[in-house]
Image (spheres, coloured by chain):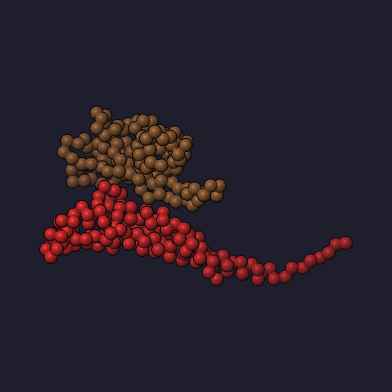
Chain colours: A brown, B red
Amino acid sequence: MNSACHILAKYLIDTHGGFNEPGSSGTWPLYRAFMPDAPGLVADIACIYDTSPDLQGKRVVDGVLSKRNGIQIHLRSNGYDEGYEKLSDVVEDLAKVHGVLVTYDSTQYKIVNISVASDGIPIGQDEKKRYHFTANFLARIVKV
Amino acid sequence: MAQIIKISGMPNVLKNLNASVGRVSRGITRGLIKGGLHLQAKSLAICPKQKGALKASSFTRNVGGHGYDADVVVGYTADYAIPVHEILSNAHGKEFNIKHAAEIQAAVGTPLGTAEGGMFLRGENEQAKFLEKPAREERMTIIQIVATEALKP
């Protein structure tokens, strides 16, 4: 199975909208696993990470390990309100996800559900005075 | 034919039941605090350390009442605890040691190699998510600690 952060990034770009592939001309590029910082890079960017999963034991029927993948979405924005609103939209949308199919790397996955582990929180400003926000989720994703 | 059954000892039954409820509720409070301290210890083992302020700010505290009203919280009071916990791109632990290997080597014996300078070898397991990760991984152990204390005679 591919990493949950890549599968959810695909969902956020293709279905949720509001994010774009890094390198494209669109706003709010969504990076995976590393938030870059370089001169010339737009301030408003997002990054999605895999975090520690919630292991829930083995399923009785087939012995497969049941787990919920830990996910963090980290936003960086020049404006406090823009960043806050963007992350609130994402949290609201992801909390409603239920049984959504996503195709990533030629494999189809089902996002069974997503629970919000921590709501969007502002975590302060960096040395360039940009605002940072994070939200954490637990996602159950299965290969179809 | 009607029969009359007389039950005796009800006051004793009720007295013992009340005593048991009190014992269990006290045990749950004790278990929650013990479980919180267990989580705090696991968290401290992986929390990033430079000058030690973050580590020193950790706490386990009952912010609720007694018995079933107990509400035990584990956390850190340092103002920078949230960014250190949440920003996953920062290098900590082994990753820090690899990223700054040359600087750490050059800083040995200089002010840069002290806690103030920051260029010293970090604990290999130090990382972001230093509270969330053990909270997930130790959940069953914590439940076991609470249950054990609650059932103690």
Nearest to the observer: residue B26 or residue B50: B50
Image position, residue B68 (x, y; %): 50, 60
Query: Looking at the picture, does residue B120 appear above or below residue A42?
Result: below
Image position, residue A85 (x, y; %): 32, 36
Nearest to the observer: residue B78 or residue A71: A71
Q: Is residue B62 visible?
A: no
Q: Quadrant of residue B9?
A: bottom right
In the picture, the quarter occupied by the N terminus of chain A is top left
Left or right: A101, with A87 as reference point: right
* Extreme residue toward the top, this view: A25
* Extreme residue toward the front, this view: A106
Nearest to the observer: residue A69 or residue A85: A69
Residue at 22% of width from left, 54% of height from top? B98
Query: Looking at the picture, does residue B7 appear above or below residue A6?
Result: below
Query: Looking at the picture, does residue A12 appear above or below residue B44?
Result: above
Q: Quadrant of residue A71?
A: top left
Q: Is residue B4 visible?
A: yes
Left or right: A105, with B123 as reference point: right
Residue at 29% of width from left, 33% of height from top? A21
Nearest to the observer: residue B14 or residue B94: B94
Residue at 18% of width from left, 54% of height from top? B100
Image position, residue B39 (x, y; %): 39, 60
Residue at 25% of width from left, 30% of height from top? A24
Image position, residue A139 (x, y; %): 42, 43
Q: Quadrant of residue B46?
A: bottom left
Query: Tag count in the figure?
Result: 0
